């Protein structure tokens, strides 16, 4: 984003997830601690606190908000007039809706510059299982997603795919308890080195996300998978879309996902057929995507029985 006003850095995440620690560390870095005045708006109280003496040294002033309804354009105008900040950091409440700020018509002179989501990797699975809609709300527009307190025995690959299912562009970072980057090999439920990569019925969502994230891994490879067909006049001649229904957030948030597929007998295919597709994947520009992406070239498309489970997931 290009900074044209007072930048607002929005830091979200659940209580005790590491937001305060992240903000304190960031504010003390040379690139941030440059003498400019920071307005820190804290929207929830955790165990970690900001020391007044440290804030003063960092040219920062802290204001707390107790209720979501207090975060308004009028409040921001008042803060600008009172403190004349050069930038604003908001430590957001994990239970507040992101739309309260992201859909707000910001007062003149303010700009939502960056959204960063912070998660404690040791509790992320619990929140994902029980508060998935809140997780999706936090990360869907995030520019950066940071998992802290990671260990290599955690399902980090699954965490990354869960984020990628709803946010294609955000940078995903994994750190250990010391703040060092955690490197890991992504675990895949199929053999990526096989002459034909066999995608299991339950693994379509995993393959879909991984193919978008790692084009070099699949470019030129042959894959085989089960899918439902979709055909519309909007698709290029000689093509169809083999895909699956995927649940990205909750039972009410289902999307049909797949990659455009060219096939010499595409005109004979009807929509909503279950088929097994064997195709070579190419990463190339596609007019239907208006961008580069995976495009399939089918060697065979055969009738198939429906899978045991209609929906696919990303973990």
Image (cartoon, rainbow, N blue to C red):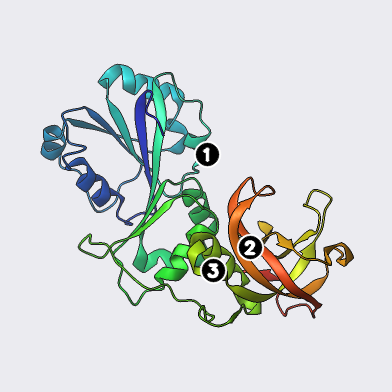
Within 10 Å of disc 3 (Cα), the crowding (few <14, some 14-19, many 20+) is: many
Cα gap from disc 2 to disc 3, whole angstroms:
24 Å
262 w.r.t. 64: above or below: below
Residue depicted at 68% across the width and 69% down the height: 311
Disc 3 secondary structure class: helix
Q: Position of residue 260 (x, y in %)?
A: 70, 59
Residue depicted at 51% across the width and 67% down the height: 129
**Horizontal relation, residue 295 to residue 33: left or right:** right
Give the number of the mark in front: 3 or 1: 3
Looking at the image, do the residues carrying marks 3 and 1 touch, with CB atoms under 8 Å apart?
no
Residue 147: image quadrant is: bottom left
> Reading the chain from its start, which is encountered first: label 2 or label 1?
1
Q: Position of residue 227 (x, y in %)?
A: 73, 71
Within 10 Å of disc 1 (Cα), the crowding (few <14, some 14-19, many 20+) is: few
Residue that carries the numbered disc 1 in the rendered image? 99
Taking the image as drawn, is residue 174 in sight? Answer: yes
Residue that carries the numbered disc 3 in the rendered image? 218
Of the pair 167 and 273, the residue shown nearer to us: 273
């Amino acid at each position: 984003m290009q900074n044209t006003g007072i930048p607002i850095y929005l830091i979200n995440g659940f209580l005790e997830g590491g937001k305060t620690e992240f903000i304190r560390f960031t504010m003390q870095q040379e690139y941030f601690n440059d003498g400019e005045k920071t307005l820190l708006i804290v929207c929830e109280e955790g165990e970690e606190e900001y020391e007044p003496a440290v804030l003063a040294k960092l040219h920062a002033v802290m204001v707390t908000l107790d209720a979501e309804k207090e975060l308004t354009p009028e409040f921001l105008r008042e803060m600008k007039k009172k403190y004349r900040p050069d930038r604003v950091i908001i430590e957001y409440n994990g239970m507040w809706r992101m739309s309260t700020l992201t859909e707000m018509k910001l007062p003149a002179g303010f700009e939502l510059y960056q959204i960063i989501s912070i998660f404690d990797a040791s509790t992320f699975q619990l929140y994902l299982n029980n508060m998935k809609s809140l997780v999706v709300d936090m990360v869907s527009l995030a520019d950066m997603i940071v998992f802290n307190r990671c260990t290599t025995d955690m399902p980090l690959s699954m965490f990354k795919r869960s984020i990628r299912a709803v946010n294609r562009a955000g940078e995903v970072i994994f750190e250990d308890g010391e703040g060092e980057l955690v490197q890991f090999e992504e675990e895949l439920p199929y053999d990526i080195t096989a002459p034909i990569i066999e995608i299991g019925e339950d693994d379509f969502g995993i393959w879909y996300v991984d193919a978008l994230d790692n084009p070099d891994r699949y470019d030129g490879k042959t894959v085989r998978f089960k899918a439902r067909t979709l055909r519309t006049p909007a698709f290029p001649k000689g093509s169809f879309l083999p895909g699956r229904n995927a649940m990205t957030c909750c039972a009410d948030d289902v999307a049909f996902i797949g990659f455009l597929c060219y096939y010499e007998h595409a005109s004979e295919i009807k929509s909503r057929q279950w088929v097994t597709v064997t195709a070579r994947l190419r990463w190339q520009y596609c007019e239907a995507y208006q961008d580069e992406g995976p495009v399939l070239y089918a060697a065979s498309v055969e009738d198939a029985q429906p899978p045991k489970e209609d929906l696919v997931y990303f973990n």
